[in-house]
Amino acid sequence: MAYISKRDRKREKDRKIAARNRREIIAARLTRRDLMKAGLLTGAGYLILKKGLSARASTPRDDPQSPPTTPFVEPLPIPPIAQPVSSLNPVPMVNPNTAAGEGRTRPHQALNLFPPQKLYLVTQQEVLKSVHPELPLQRLWSFNGQVPGPTYHARYGEPVLVRNVNGLPLDNGGFGLPSVSTHLHNGHTPSESDGFPCDFFERGQFYDQHYPNVLAGFASTHPPNGDIRESMSTLWYHDHRVDHTAENVYKGLAGFYLLFNDFDTGDETTGFRLPSGEFDVPMIFTDRVFDEGTGQLFFDLGNLDGILGDKFLVNGRIQPFFEVKRRRYRFRWLDGGPSRFYQFHLTKASNPSQVNQFWQISNDGNLLPSPKLVNNIRISVAERADAIIDFSQFAAGTVVYLENRLEQDDGRGPTGDVLPAGQGDKVLKFIVTGDPVVDNSAAPTATTQYYQLPGTADAPRITRTFKFERGNGQWQINGKFFNCDDVRFRIQQNSVEKWILQNSSGGWQHPIHIHFEEFQILKINGANPAGVNIARKDVMRLEHNMQVEVYFRFRDFLGRYPMHCHNTIHEDHAMMLRWDIDTTGDNKTNP
Amino acid sequence: MPNTNRRNLLAMFGLVGDDPPARDSKEQRKWLDTSPRERIRQRYFPNIELTTHEGRRVLFYDDLIKDKLVVINFMYADCEGVCPTIMLNLARVQKELGQRVGRDIFIYSLTLRPEKDTPKVLNDYAKMHGVKPGWLLLTGKPDDIETIRRRLGFVDPDPKLDRDRSNHIGNLRYGNEPLTRWGTCPGMADADFIVKSILWLDWPEEERSKKGGQK
Ligand SMILES: [Cu+2]
């Protein structure tokens, strides 16, 4: 990427802002007097630069703008909890049941070791859904009719099997490929059940996915039950169809998978006493565009860089409101993509500049060693953060917005600027109600202890370096492109590795996701990690000109997994590679 | 910008309260009843006249895209950067797709230097790269080519980089027009993987045999 001077960038940005403002003002039919009053126009008639008018800049092709919608008119939908079935017909088998129409290609590694205690049957199917009362019904793709899909409540020690049925239509309604592979993001899952991008199955086929819900280390460092420090909490599942993930997830194929155990119990009177039940609320943030003429969900098939929406959806609805009681809540925040990064602040309607702190208790859905008191939380695509917000600090009737203040004009990533309070995008409105209410959850403190971090002292068997680049518009890792059949390197089962992830570009950011094992950050640009980065993670936000060293233990299972950029446009355009775990491993340092 | 109505915009500057009670936009809005296929045509495929390396005049949508499974890239004849690799790759793709190329699958390479790349120049270039029937090299009026390039998104978001032709976008766009299935991959990816990617957008088996389009 050529070097662009800071001044050039600033000028280009100013030009864009001015052009955008002009268009918005014309569209909003403001009079000259309105503009003068708002301080947007000088006496000589020049428009004043003002940031924060729009969530998107225009592109050479003139991206469509969504029709107007009134914010905060509908309540936040809460996805229903997935319900198991008593049996599956045909009965799940170790070997792929090809004759009955199963799309799986490899036998289950651990079905007999961890016999499923719960069975689920889920069909991926088209559904007509409302995203906002002022827009027409949308043709979305769902799990069992739900967008987002139902939330799984799973427990460690309670293995499950999910039978996925592809019931998608041939007519895709303009985008999306009716061929799917469901990935359980963050799962310590055997390869054949992971939802590897090339393990897709077609319309009319099914695929049995076995989730052992077992802690890493069970067959290696910590037999027989695994390492409790590897406990995970907030996972999600989404379609991962190679080359078509962005469109399929954009259409709705995503949902939550929550894991509980004897500490994070799902009951706020036991264990870590985290807010539970109706006070444990998952939220998936997705930005979308709707065609101005038809009102239908619009996906830009010609986009190479990353897709930004001008409508902000939470759990599938545009800018909902959420009535909260005066007590603690646990929110599980997830950036559902395709390409936007967020930085969330709590903004009080009556006093936007007031800083309202809250607790961050997890990074990528893995509980931190201790809660951290924060002013805001930044997440990129597929990153998760669990937050505890205590609404008893607000009087009844208070309105608090969840406001995204991270400036991002295009798919390349955020500009690096944070917008002033009140000038970002308000994605959700909290309304504090006056109901008296019990709160049995524990108040987080800086000395509250969750799980300690596993050590990073064992010497890595190998250090590998990965460069994330773009050449002639083509996304690549170490100069190469994804190929389902190309095993770029092999990891030795039960070994420790150190990876160096590099982004040498000043123009692009990449949320890099590695399947199967969490990593710990050893260094960011040469410095030790701090704050919430002292954590177990599965997505590394590679910001401008960043180099990160991460530490892994690859344990227990064998088979194929990917590493990829989770800006799903980059991912679909080959910014991905396949690695395999086998018993020997290789010595490729720049695979 | 239609998503910013007057009230919201004023609200951003603190001129009115944050809660817009007015639901003015809810007044029965008439939505267009246009098929997704038609919307895609309108947005991405202007029906512009182009000339093939064989000197034939063709319309971009009517003659080249409609009802077909297509692969599209941009190149120019004296490009020394990524073009030779990509053209070599496309030749392998054509070979692997066999008889279907020219029947229901078509490959199109559009020049980025229409002012220099006359049909004659493109014809020589086609011969050099072993281009067979069903793969067309295309030129046209510079403004028209530029329109197609922008519509299809072969554009770098950085204007400076975008002007530099040696840095031109090396991706392939491929798609099944009637089924509204589209994809993109790097032109420098492995040829066998490009072929797979294209065929993932193919008609279902039963329809393919109906069309007599078996490989
Ligand atoms: Cu990326």
Image (tube, coloured by chain):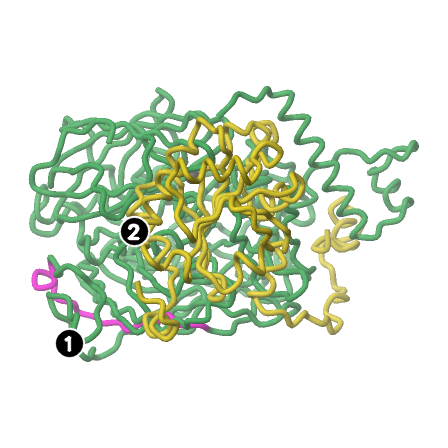
Chain colours: A green, B yellow
Q: Amino acid at mark 1?
A: Val
Question: Numbered disc 2: what chain?
Answer: B
Instruction: Describe the element under mark 2 as helix, strand or loop.
Output: helix
The foreground one among A100 and B194 is B194
Instruction: Describe the element under mark 1 as helix, strand or loop.
Output: loop
Q: Are marks 1 and 2 on the same chain?
A: no
Quadrant in the picture for the C terminus of chain A: top left
Residue tagged by mark 2?
Answer: B96
Q: Where is ligand 1, by quadrant?
A: top left
Labelled disc at residue A91:
1
Q: Between tags 1 and 2, which lies in front?
A: 2
Q: Is residue A77 above or below residue A362?
A: below
Q: Amino acid at mark 2?
A: Glu
Residue A268 in sight here: no
Magenta-colored stretch includes residue B41: no
The foreground one among A35 and A392 is A35
Part of the protein shown in magenta:
A110-126
